[in-house]
């Protein structure tokens, strides 16, 4: 492939982008479909691509493209979340933090001691003693 690229550039090619290929144009990615998918995702953040596919009769590949490229979202812990915060989200977080600080007042140390930031997960280690136990 590198030899092919080198030959094309020696012949005068200047673009690194793919040439347009013949075939059916993608007509599914429309503003209307983006809005429909956005509505479904915001209603249920745990929705699967195949569920959207069945409901809107759009291929999973196009649904994934719309969610990733047009809605700028990704899936984390089985939920669709925005890749970047919008200015509205940033403003909402700022206001929530200010409201919290106002609510706390002078009792900041007492309140912060009560806040749980992670869940307690117990991880047990099991070392099998024999090959028979490890097969189980």
Image (cartoon, rainbow, N blue to C red):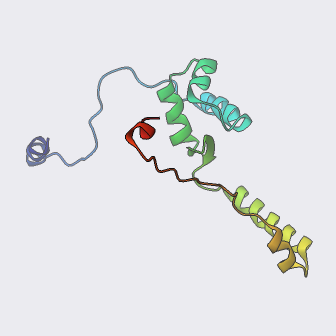
- Find residue 52 and report its image quarter: top right
Q: Is residue 2 above or below residue 25?
A: below
Q: In percent of the image, x 85 and y 73: which residue is there?
A: 111
Q: In percent of the image, x 68 and y 38: which residue is there?
A: 45
Query: Residue 94: x and y, percent?
Result: 76, 66
Residue furthest bottom in the image: 106
| 104 on left or right of 130 | right
Q: Is residue 112 above or below residue 46?
A: below
Query: Residue 128: x and y, percent?
Result: 45, 46
Query: Residue 125: x and y, percent?
Result: 53, 53
Query: Residue 70: x and y, percent?
Result: 55, 40
Q: In percent of the image, x 81 and y 65: which residue is there?
A: 95
Foreground: 92 or 6? 92
Q: Is residue 71 above or below residue 93?
A: above
Image label count:
0
Foreground: 87 or 99? 99
- Find residue 56 and report its image quarter: top right
């Amino acid at each position: 492939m590198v030899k092919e690229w080198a030959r094309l550039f020696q012949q005068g090619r200047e673009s690194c982008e793919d040439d347009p290929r013949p075939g059916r144009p993608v007509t599914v990615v429309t503003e209307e479909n983006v809005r429909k998918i956005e509505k479904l995702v915001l209603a249920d953040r745990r929705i699967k691509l195949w569920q959207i596919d069945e409901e809107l009769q759009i291929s999973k590949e196009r649904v994934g493209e719309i969610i990733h490229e047009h809605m700028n979202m990704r899936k984390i812990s089985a939920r669709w979340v925005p890749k970047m915060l919008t200015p509205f989200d940033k403003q909402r977080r700022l206001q929530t933090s200010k409201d919290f600080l106002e609510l706390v007042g002078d009792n900041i140390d007492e309140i912060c001691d009560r806040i749980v930031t992670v869940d307690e997960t117990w991880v047990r280690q099991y070392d099998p003693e024999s090959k028979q136990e490890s097969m189980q």
